Amino acid sequence: ILNVEQSPQSLHVQEGDSTNFTCSFPSSNFYALHWYRWETAKSPEALFVMTLNGDEKKKGRISATLNTKEGYSYLYIKGSQPEDSATYLCAFPGAGNQFYFGTGTSLTVIP
Amino acid sequence: EPEVTQTPSHQVTQMGQEVILRCVPISNHLYFYWYRQILGQKVEFLVSFYNNEISEKSEIFDDQFSVERPDGSNFTLKIRSTKLEDSAMYFCASSRTGDNSPLHFGNGTRLTVT
């Protein structure tokens, strides 16, 4: 079992604040690192699939960076909005298409 | 946009009964997965399926569980002799090519074993 850690576990920010959280994963045998957003009563939705060290991907106000040598990825949200409230999951594919998920960071944006 | 569909959305069953959870993956996807999330815990991998056979399974996926792709569209998870600890949200997912393709999840089936 591979260990994928996310921090913080939960976060409350004011609308308009920028925020970031971390996903740590094993730095050996790296294939890819996935980020998902999981809103209450919905299914997880893919945000990014990151494959190369130094990758930076952006989707609107959300961006992510990747450091495969040290085994971490950051997710940034600029100018948080209430609709950004969700749990953000990272997932690390191991051998044989088995994905290991972190526990998620629960973000609440207060209007 | 095509999506993964799961039925039923909620299943209540008595301990010891068998349940079948159904999924229709996205039609041009090649990899299929079952995950579960017990309340308050991590999303856990159960099994992956490719080319009409299991490609990987976790320790959780013991003889109590089985998967099938009975026709070209459905992908089912059967849980035999359910236990209280099988109560969880079960998610089906599919992806086009594996590791580097995002997973597309269904809305999940909430299984409650009483």
Image: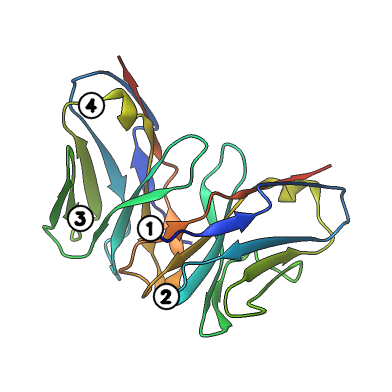
Q: Residues within 10 Å of mark 4 (few under 14, many from 20)?
A: many
Foreground residue, A66 or B36? B36
Across the whole image, how many numbered discs are drawn on residues? 4
Quadrant location, the C terminus of chain A: top left
Nearer the camera: disc 1 or disc 3: 1
Tag 4, which secondary structure? loop
Q: Residues within 10 Å of mark 3 (few under 14, many from 20)?
A: few
Q: Residue A80, labelled with which disc? A: 4
Q: Is residue A1 left or right of residue A46?
A: right
Q: Are marks 2 and 3 on the same chain?
A: no
Q: CA distance from mark 2 to mark 3?
A: 35 Å
- For disc 3, the chain is A
Q: CA distance from mark 4 to mark 3?
A: 28 Å
Q: Quadrant of residue A100?
A: bottom left
Tell me, yes or no, whether the two marked residues, 4 and 1, touch with CB atoms within 8 Å: no
**Pointer 2: what residue?**
B28
Q: Residue B1, labelled with which disc? A: 1
Give the residue drawn at x 36%, y 42%: A6
Nearer the camera: disc 4 or disc 1: 1
Marked residue nearer the N-terminal end (2 or 1): 1
Marked residue nearer the N-terminal end (4 or 3): 3
- For disc 4, the chain is A
**Pointer 3: what residue?**
A70
